[in-house]
Amino acid sequence: MPRFAAEPSDDPVLVCKDLRYAYLGRFPALDGVSFSVRRGEKVALLGANGCGKSTLLKVLDGLVFPDSGEYHAFGAQVTEDNLEDEQFSMGFRARIGFIFQNSDVQVFSPSVREEIAFGPLQLGLPREQATARVDDVLAMLDIAELADRAPYQLSGGQKKRVAIASVLVMNPEVLLFDEPTAALDPRTQHWLAELLVELNRAGKTIVLATHDLDVLDLVADRALVFTEEHRIVAAGAPAELLADRELLTSVNLVHPRSRIRA
């Protein structure tokens, strides 16, 4: 059974080689996608709705598996067979965390405290240690007053914080975000963008899918641009890509007459 390598910091932590995936075998979502992510990077996946960004994040989190191609994380190939091995799965799950676009599919426990404690307890942490982690994350995200509330009592922004807390409590090395600022009010969007920056400064590697160009230069060091044909058509620094109006128009990220905020 493959083991995770103790890779040098300048080596990629995530590597995708020629990934192809089609829903039901008939509806393409990824068509020959290859890229890598180095430790400590903030990488944005850019593209219009339906281009394959969310599917790729699910591949990176081991929720779906490519029809062909290879995905390696932390020096080991991630496959359905490997994830059926308990030791491999626990090692992988402890090092990578996924924050879904819709918090309702992620927040399901009777209370916020129980929701955040679920992951550490599932991984076998003693309850006392899990409780200490939960308290730390509640304080870090300034949601201690929500600890005893039920998820249905929370606003959209509060649910997003709880969903993030339920992942951060595991202290993963890599964080995956699917449209993190979608459907949030401006204040919460700003808070979340700053949180991404702070998490990255603390050493987290971040991969996020978005079509929100306004915060791109803040939340990403590098961006990959997807076409509606489910391929990567460009990669580069946010400023470079935002300056290429022809590119952004061709992938349906901007209207030909729209203006991009500087």
Image (spheres, rainbow, N blue to C red):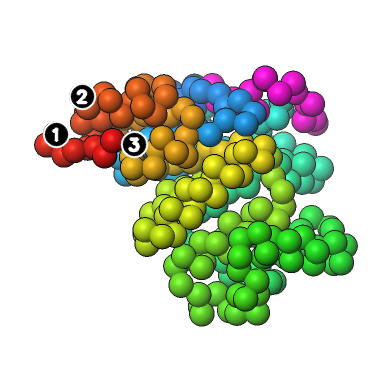
For the residues labelled 1 and 2, the Cα–Cα distance comes to: 8 Å
Residue occupying the point 70% across, 30% down: 74
For the residues labelled 1 and 3, the Cα–Cα distance comes to: 15 Å
Which residue carries the number 2 mark?
A: 246
Question: Magenta segment, which residues?
Answer: 1-17
**Which element type, helix, strand or loop, lies under badge 3?**
loop
Residue 231 seen from this side: no
* Residue 6 falls inside the magenta stretch: yes
Q: Residues within 10 Å of mark 1 (few under 14, many from 20)?
A: few
Q: Earlier in the sequence, mark 1 or mark 3?
A: 3
Residue 194 seen from this side: yes
Which residue carries the number 1 mark?
A: 256
| Identity, as a three-letter code, of the amino acid under mark 1 | Pro
For the residues labelled 2 and 3, the Cα–Cα distance comes to: 14 Å
Percent across and percent down for residue 235 are: 41, 22
Percent across and percent down for residue 207 are: 53, 38
Q: Nearer the viewer, residue 146 or 151?
A: 146
The prevailing secondary structure element of the residues shown in magenta is loop
Q: Are marks 2 and 3 in contact (CB under 8 Å)?
A: no
| Identity, as a three-letter code, of the amino acid under mark 3 | Gly
Q: Are marks 1 and 3 in contact (CB under 8 Å)?
A: no
Q: Say which quadrant the N terminus sits in.
A: top right
Residue occupying the point 51% across, 23% down: 35
Which residue carries the number 3 mark?
A: 47
State the image quarter where residue 38 is shown.
Answer: top right
